[in-house]
Every structure is written in C-alpha cells, then in structure tokens.
Amino acid sequence: MAAHATAENIKDVEQRIKDWGYGVNTIYGQERTVVGAVGVPEADKADYAERLESLDYVERVIAILRPYKFVSREIHPEGTIIDVKGVKIGGPKIVFMAGPCTIESYEQTLDTAKAVQKAGAAILRGGAYKPCTSPYSFPGLGEEGLKILKQVSEDTGLPIITEVMDPRNVDLVCEYSDILQIGTRNMQNYDLLREVGLARKPVLLKRGMWAKIEEWLQAAEYVVLGGNTQVMLCERGIRTFETHTRNTMDLSAIPSVKQLSHLPVIADPAHGTGRASLVNPMTRAAIACGADGLLIEVHAQPDKAIKDGAQSLNHEHFAELIQECRPIAQAVGRDI
Amino acid sequence: MAAHATAENIKDVEQRIKDWGYGVNTIYGQERTVVGAVGVPEADKADYAERLESLDYVERVIAILRPYKFVSREIHPEGTIIDVKGVKIGGPKIVFMAGPCTIESYEQTLDTAKAVQKAGAAILRGGAYKPCTSPYSFPGLGEEGLKILKQVSEDTGLPIITEVMDPRNVDLVCEYSDILQIGTRNMQNYDLLREVGLARKPVLLKRGMWAKIEEWLQAAEYVVLGGNTQVMLCERGIRTFETHTRNTMDLSAIPSVKQLSHLPVIADPAHGTGRASLVNPMTRAAIACGADGLLIEVHAQPDKAIKDGAQSLNHEHFAELIQECRPIAQAVGRDI
Amino acid sequence: MAAHATAENIKDVEQRIKDWGYGVNTIYGQERTVVGAVGVPEADKADYAERLESLDYVERVIAILRPYKFVSREIHPEGTIIDVKGVKIGGPKIVFMAGPCTIESYEQTLDTAKAVQKAGAAILRGGAYKPCTSPYSFPGLGEEGLKILKQVSEDTGLPIITEVMDPRNVDLVCEYSDILQIGTRNMQNYDLLREVGLARKPVLLKRGMWAKIEEWLQAAEYVVLGGNTQVMLCERGIRTFETHTRNTMDLSAIPSVKQLSHLPVIADPAHGTGRASLVNPMTRAAIACGADGLLIEVHAQPDKAIKDGAQSLNHEHFAELIQECRPIAQAVGRDI
Amino acid sequence: MAAHATAENIKDVEQRIKDWGYGVNTIYGQERTVVGAVGVPEADKADYAERLESLDYVERVIAILRPYKFVSREIHPEGTIIDVKGVKIGGPKIVFMAGPCTIESYEQTLDTAKAVQKAGAAILRGGAYKPCTSPYSFPGLGEEGLKILKQVSEDTGLPIITEVMDPRNVDLVCEYSDILQIGTRNMQNYDLLREVGLARKPVLLKRGMWAKIEEWLQAAEYVVLGGNTQVMLCERGIRTFETHTRNTMDLSAIPSVKQLSHLPVIADPAHGTGRASLVNPMTRAAIACGADGLLIEVHAQPDKAIKDGAQSLNHEHFAELIQECRPIAQAVGRDI
C-alpha cells in the first residue's frame, strides 16, 4: 500500500483480493502496510496485479510465484533429453549443430555438411527462410532450400535444423526439417509459438535480443502448453550499449536457465558476438558453463557467403574448434 | 584495412569491389588505409560488407548511405499526411487515438468511445487480439472483438485502430478496422510486414522495444516496398536498465524520426512508462517535441480492466488530459 | 523462502530477523512461504538482505521501504526552492543555465554570457575542469578558468555553475562558483559526494548514465546527509543500445523524480542527445513534463569550440530557443 | 557530408582540415561525398570531429584510428606480465585473488586468508574502503582495515589487493597494498586515474558498468600515460535490462580485450552476476575464454558477512571451485 493509504483503502484492497478467491494476510509495518494474497485461484493473477496497481493507494504489486510452470525445474527435477533421430540433446554429449547461415545450393550445402560431419558435428543447420533487417537483403531460397537440406540430410545421415518464421509455413517446414528453429525476432510471435506447440517436431527457441530470462521461459511455456514438450532454448546475445560486438552474449543465462528449467540449452556464439574471432573463445566458455549444444555458422569461403560471412568459420577452422573444445567438454565431465 | 594489411591485401579488396560493380577510391593514411567503394550497383551492399569483414585484413566496413530509401525525408521532403475517413494524421491537428486496452464488451466499448469522443479523441483504439507475455493471460475476444469495434465505430462515427498479430488475419482485420496496428514484438515479423504492405489500410508500426531508429525505419521500408505508403510510426518505449518505469520512453526518437523520415509519428505514453501517473506529463512532452498523435489507454474503471489497468486513465482523467494538452499544442503552432 | 525450504529453514530465518530487532510476520502460501520483517531497527537493512540471500533456502529478499529518506517527498511534501543570489530554482520560473561547454578565454566567456543573459538565461555555466573520455583531450583551464568565470559573473551579475571533479578541489571551486556541478561519471564518487555535502553551496547532481532513479536519489541522500540540503538533480541521458543519439534522454525521469522527491529537477538536452538539432525539441519537452530548469551549451561559433561543438547552440539559436520555450512554459502555468 | 551539401560546403570542410595540418582526400559518390583527413597532427582529433559535426552540412565524422595507443596490442604484440611479489599475472598460471568483500577483523581475515591460500589462491583480496550505493551502509574500516590486511599478508606471505576510492588516499593505500584496485564506479574518475598513474604499484582497473570496451581501454591509457604501465583490466558485469542477475557478465569482453590490448584480464564473477550459484560456472567460463585471473569473494560464513553475502562462497565451496577449475585451465594449456 502507498504511504498515504487509509484504513479504508486497505480494507478495499483486502475485499478485492477476497472476491477474486484468494486468502488475505496483511502485515502492518511502521511506514507501510503489505497486503498478502494467498492461494492460487483459477483466473490469471497478472491481470489482477494490473488492476490493483491502477489504484493510487497501491504502491506496488509483487509476484511471489514464478510466471511459468511446465518448463520449470521445480515440477520436473531431471533435465529433459530430446532425441533427434538418435542424437540426444541434453545428455552427456555436447551436440554441435553446424552449417551455412544461408542455403545457397546443393553443392555448397553438401560440401559443408560433409566437412562439419567429419569434424564432429551431429546436426546440420542451414537457413531457407531468412529474417533480414533490410528489405533489400536476400530472404533465402524458401522451399527450394528446404529440399536441398532434406536431400543433404539423406545423403549424409545428419538430422537438420532450420528456421520457420511464418505460422503458415510450420507444416511445410515440418515435412523437411527435424528441428524447428524460432529466431530471436519471433520469440514473442505468439501465433507462431502456438503453431509450433501443435507440431510434433522438436523446437529450438532463441532468446529475444530484448528478453529477460523470465520472459524467455514464458515463451517456452507457450510451446509446451500447446502439447509440444520437446523444446530447447538457445542463448544468442542480447542488446546492450556495447558496440564492439553485435550483441552481448549473456553466458550467465546458460547456468541460470539450467537452474530454473529442465530444458536443454544451446549457445550461438556467432550471432552472440558477430565476430568470427570470438566464436572459439565463446564456444569454449559456453561448454565450460554448462551448454548442452552449440549452433555454429560454417561456410567453405566466408568471404563469398551470401550472408553472415563476418561471423562464419571456414571448414578448417571449424575442425580446429571441435579439437579445441573436446578437452573443455571432458573437463566438465562430458564429451562431444 | 587492418593495420597489418599488405599491399597485396589492399589490391585484393580493391579487385573485389570492382568486380561487384563499384568504383574504387583508396586513401592511404599513415597508420591505416581506407578503401572507398563508390556508386550503387544493383545487388545489396549489406551482404558485401559481411563478406569483406570476414577477411582478417579488413578491420571494419562503414556504410555511408542510409539503409532505407522510400521512407526517408531526403526523397520526400514534405511530411506525409494520412487521411483516415477524414481524420488527417500528420497535419496541423494532433490526433488522439483513445480507448480500452482490451475490448471486453459492446457496452464497455461504446461507453468509453462516447467518453473519449466527447473529450476530443478522433480515433477509437481497442484490442481484439492481444499479445501476452504470459500464456495464461486473456488473449482478447478475437473476431468478436472486431465486430464490437466496428459496431461502435458505426454508432459513433469514430474510425478505429486495432492490432493484427498473425499474417493469416490481415484480411480479416482489414474488413473491420480503419488502421492496422503492428505491435512492438512484431516490428521485425517480416511475413506480417509484407502482408500489411499488400493491404490497402493505413498501418501504425510500433517501435520494437529493442530496435534502433534505423532498424525501425527499415521495418517501415518493408511495408512501403509492398506498395502501402500509408505508414505511421509509434514510439512506445525501449528496454533499458531502469526499473521504475516498465520501459524507457525515448522521446528524442520523435524529432529524430521527423528529421530522418516523412512519416507521421505517434506516441504511446502508457506502454512507454507503464504508469498512469506518468501519462499526462509524457503526453505533454510528446506534443511539445513534435508528435503528430497519441495512443492513450482509457477505461471506465481501470481497477476493473481485464488488462493494463495500471497504465489506463479513466474517462474524467482523459478529458482533463486533453484540456491540459491543448495549450501545449497551441504553443507549438498546432491544435487538437 | 525457496520452494524447497523446510519448516526448520523458515524458523531459522524468523529467528535471524528477530535477532536483528525486527518483528516477524509469516505468510504461508500453497507454493511459497513469505517471511515478513516489520519495524525499522537502527542498523542497515541492506546488509541484512544480502545475508539472507546467501542462504540457499531463501529465494529472494524484497525491500518494501524506499532506500532513501531525506530526499523523499513523503517527509517533505512541498517542493524545495533553492535560492542562488536571488535566482529561485524550483519555483514558478523556469531557470535557464547557459554558456560554453569549456571556458576558453575571458573574451569568449563574457561575449557568450552577455548573449545568453540578453536572451533570458539566469545563470552562467562553463567548464574549468572537464572530464574527458580520452586522455588526449583538453582537460580545461583549471583555476584560471574559475577566475574568468568569477570575473564574468561580477561583470554581468549572473551567478555561475561549474563542475567539480576532485574532492581536493571542492573548497577551491566554492570560492569561485555559486553552484557545484557533479558530473555524470561522478554520481557515485562517494568521497566527492561527502565533500560537497559539507560545502555551503548548492549542488547540481547529474544522473549517472548507468543509474536507476533509485540510485540517483540515494546519491542525493549522501549529500543531504552531509548537511547540505540544497541539491538539485539533473537528467542528462542514460546509456542504451540506441546509437543515433549519444545517450537516450529519459524524460520520464523528470516527472518520476518530481513525484518521489522534493528536489528541483534540471534537464540537459545537449548531453542527453549529443545533437544540436535535438536540443530545441527536447528542451520544449522537458519544460512540458515539469523540468524546473535547463542546462544548455552555447558557443559563439560551435564549429570553433574546443569541446562539444556538435551539441552547442550559437547565440542566435539560443535566443530563438528561449522564444520558442516561453509559450510552452506558460502552457504549464510557469514562465521563463 | 550531408546529402544537401554544396560544392562550397565541401570546399569549406576541406579547407578546415588542411588548416589543422591534415592532408585531404575527397571521394565523390553518387549520393554522398566523403572528405578524408589523412595524417596525424599534434592536436587532438576528437575535438576537431566535434567542430565539424556542428556544421549542418556535415552528416557524420568517423574515426578510423583507435582512440588509445600505449595499451594497444598493435604497439606491444606480446602480452604484459605483471609480477606481484613473485606472483605472475598474465603468464601461464591463472591467478586466483580471493578473500572477503569487507575486512571485518584480523581473525576473520586471517582465517579466510589461510583457507584460500590452502585451496590455491595466490593473492588475498579484501575491502577497507567500500563504495556503497546506500549512504546507510557500512563504508569499511578504512586505515584499520589496511593494517589488518598488511598483517595478514605478512603472516601468510600472500600479496594483497584492495580498493582505493579517493585520490587523497592513494599514497596511504600504496603503503599497505600490493595492488591498487579501481572500482567500477571510478573507472572514469580521472583525478583518481591520474593519481594511480603516478603510483609505483600495479593497478587493477574494473570496467565501468556502463563502459564500452573502447572507453575502458582509454581509462587504462590514462594510467599508463601517467607512467604506470602495470595495469590489469577486470570484467565485472555491465548494466543491461536483465534483472535475474545483478549485472550481465560480458565474457566476450575477455577475448576482445586480449585481442585489442596487451594487458592482462581478470574476471569478477561474483559482482558480474550477484549470485553465489553462478560463481562456479562463470569462473569456469572465464578461464575457458582466456582470463588471466579471477577475483572471488570468500567468507567463512556468507550469511554473517557484513556485505555481499549473497554472492560470496564459503571456504569449502572455494576449495571445490579451484578443484573444478584446474582441468579447465589445463584444457586451455594453462594451470592454476
């Protein structure tokens, strides 16, 4: 309650809380009074909070319970393991998902797929639908790109992950891809979240570049509530004032999410930093603090890539990266 | 070029730039060499920048031209005026768009519509599809809400604005609404932007809470490139470290956008601050620095609103707000 | 308490709270227990909060009372008015403090002082000690600059404001200046705050570019606790991801601080935006939302200024600014 | 140049650049003209940039050279190694600096010093002068704390690091401490930086919670320009919108600074996250991405610590931390 709240104001708030089906427990302090609402009625508490805050004699409403449930570790203490055609994400092996930012051609994709597979990657990534800040950028090959990915997947045996941006394309992408990627800009695209919640393919949900961890987990809750429990989370950098890197990679989000949730966590150091020279150290660090997998952009010739060349590794550098990371994985009791 | 770049490296970069159809102009400094690319070839320069940055002998690529064109004031020096059933947005009158956050019922909507119309609002706002951080919140009445809005619009003569979230619903919302609102979370939902670009209704594009002004203008460019030139921009607060307000309202974005672009600019002080007690001062300030209109949440009883009660004004307070704002509008040579 | 806290854990926390001299009031919810500490013992509650949070069975400690007292409006409902040689800051008149970023010479300072005085400024600003990001920049004239300021003050009758950066210089600056300015980088320089708390000159405390409003008010509390109650606060922009402006001016901080505190609030639009073309609209907006005064950089020839030319107005532009602002001031019931 | 710049405007800018002693090289594009300034005259280029930007026919000034010199790796390709009484910082061994946030007593300090030494720490940390957001918090024991630290250092042989906040105390702290710590709030306290630049003790410079990497390196340049080349940098988290952690630890700053500068880099995971449960994963990650040392808060009983209990480890947990980190250090070719 506000400092100027009267006894009548306090009674008014208590009555409202009772009317909504909560128990009431009021603490009278010397300078402030705190009215506690106890219990969990059917309807949504978030909206009640807003109503109370509209009263000028209410200073603040503080939520005690976390605003997500099914993704929380409290109700599911063991970590979730997602099985993608035999590749287990969230288990003892750290999973590398690697490949070109954008699918350019069958030959390019097959070439890079073989290179990353040989180096130790377990899943092939590649973009057929690309979110582009500029309307003048290349938006991806679309379904043709999906077909290339599928063909390369059959040729190599690598399962694939690719992004879906439009709720109208979820069924189409499900036909081709083994994992559905939700990009950072779509983390709170609720129609898309509901649609992938109905799909029967695992979902990789990137963190919105503006999203608090709590909001990210609520976005995952949308998908799980739809019936799709195979969700993994991907840290890919947040927006800050720093301009040396494209984003600021929030590695502390990895152990934080592992503590709060049972879902596997993947790191994307290329988008997290925007600089190829930082991909290796950030990959090592992500493994050291508990990431279950990595999403890495690899291109045969980054200086000829259609997109994201500045943050892509070439084939040799990717092979070296895996070599470098193996002892780190072992140092934390895992392997690649 | 990097400090360690050799004469050969410089030649290599010059050759690439020539191959892409640019002219080359190189400046040799004492410590760094700068290779300039002159001219505007057909293909996209953004991707070329990425390729060059992937070379370790290139330190940085700096774009000289702005990454948007049709929304820029350079090619359209006079401000755009959007006519919504006779209400002119971007002209000498400041336009208030007011109404409940969420459409709850016909009676509630009509009641508030009459109140805001009487007070001086020119357009009725109301949410039928609501983006909710929590999957447990009320998502709006959907098409039923649209029907209520349409009916109230016919009863009062007020044109309406409502949000569209899903590209599959653009046609449906166009049937009922006079302005299509794109919410902050969808500012970079490119499929939705492309879809409203094909619509023949004005679009209000909210700034992404993470978006730089340049990215916001690029999002508007998506819509305009689709053929829909009736775009207005809406500042609604950005994400910062400050926790006293829900967002930090970036009022300097209003004159900045007016300088860079010919599109009208609207301010949304309720979402910008999250506090009803800040709506009045921020509305006055927005008018003082050049806003063409305001988006204000009004509810007969904010403490009984389904959503966003904490930042809604009641009918009396809204009428007072308009009274307070009229002299400010006149002080900047406009009116309400 | 954490979800896994046992009855014993709860008792332990209750005992600690009692031992520190608080009353205890525990609320048992279905999923969480909340232990309330009631009363205000002598020692500092902040440190107690840290100790409790170190216990793994404590989930969060939430402070109900605000962490400042003497600067809060609760204990001092009327606004403070600071009298600087007859110029009243915080009263009905809006006070313009204008002058060059850096004192360059007597002639330059006198010339600009006369120009701003004629235009309507009531106080002369000017820097003798300059905080510079780069060690290669001009650090100001030091005491020589103070002498020039003092001389110009005597010649024109304008009181002066200048920055003090070093606790060793507080006495010296007090000899010359009528107001002591604490710059943004020193908002949490506690030794400096303590030193100006002992001075008998009004203090203008700029907001740290990283500081929450609550922290800013705590910094002001430092000064007031030292015995110096003549403190005014100055909003000058915060650090965000936006790069179009040098900082993001948080105008909502002005009415927020006016609601929370009785201290006068000044706005600094030049540093807040870093662009001369935004000074006018942001000054108008600051007045419209309740600022008690403005700090404006003015230079006879901004393109020849030693520092901050890009954000300085010339004499004519400053005169126009005041003309433009007068009707805004009147629209909010004040004057200049 | 701006789009609307005339031939005369371009000539004017070229003339100014020549007058300042630069060579001129102008690139004429189709939509913009770029005027290049070549060479490095004596005076400071930052101020020239500001002057040019004050001209309305100049759109932007872009610096090509980095704004620091002596701390840059370009002029000192091998990494600097700082020797503190035989402990080498920046060499193959990763150095743990551990101890209580605040010196409370001789017994407490000795007890923790012995525990961290046994576990593997090489340097003892402890605060005698504490920066406190709240004026009601405990400010540290001052010189008495320094004496305790010195005594414990003699008893154990551990060199010590402690913070200096006030330029008037630099000489005093130098008498007792082996390393001078500059806290985050003082990163741009230029009088303090100049003072420690004159000292003959190594300096640990924490990153300002608002500071870009470039500004941090400029602050280090201040110290080095004063003649003190023994500077190490410490990443301790930056201010972002995330509220789950106290700050967001920017681990990518570690490899970034190692690429840009020759100075050793230390990580402070307790302040970086504010949560004891994140100290271990963030310490492992910091080592994995190249940190040369760690600053860790350790207290015999964190729930009884005067300050920062929530982020302190107890003695056992610290010993476990070192055990956990050793294999990571070895995985990157180093040791503890």
Image (tube, coloured by chain):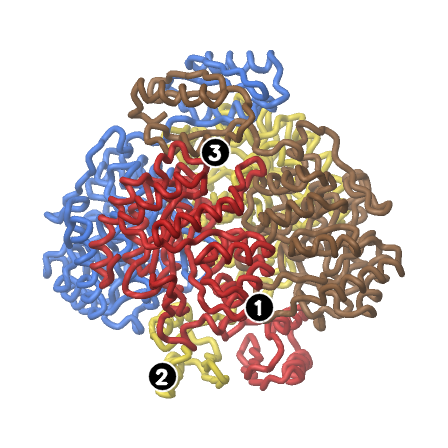
Chain colours: A red, B brown, C yellow, D blue
Q: Foreground: C244 or A274?
A: A274
Position of residue A297 measured from the top left corner of the image (x, y, whole percent): 38, 45
For this view, does B307 lie left or right of residue A305? right
- Residue at (48% x, 57% y) in the render: A180
Looking at the rendered structure, the secondary structure element under dot 1 is loop
Q: Foreground: C129 or B204?
A: B204
Q: Foreground: C325 or B116?
A: B116
Give the label on residue B47, or none.
3
The quarter in which the N terminus of chain C is drawn is bottom left
**How busy is the neighbourhood of tag 1: few (under 14 within 10 Å), some, or many (20 plus)?**
many
Which marked residue is nearer to the observer: mark 2 or mark 1? 1
Can you see residue B335? no
Q: Quadrant of residue B297?
A: bottom right
Instruction: Write down the residue under mark 2.
Output: C9
Q: Foreground: D171 or B42?
A: B42
Q: Amino acid at mark 1?
A: Pro
Same chain for the residues under marks 3 and 2 in the image: no
Residue D29 sits above or below residue C202 on the image? above
Please report contact status of discs 2 and 1: CB closer than 8 Å, yes or no: no
For this view, does A228 lie left or right of residue A263? right
Closer to the chain start, of discs 3 and 1, is 3
- Residue at (45% x, 84% y) in the render: C24
For this view, does A221 lie left or right of residue C97? left
Instruction: Write down the residue under mark 1.
Output: B135
Q: Amino acid at mark 2?
A: Asn
Give the label on residue A200, or none.
none
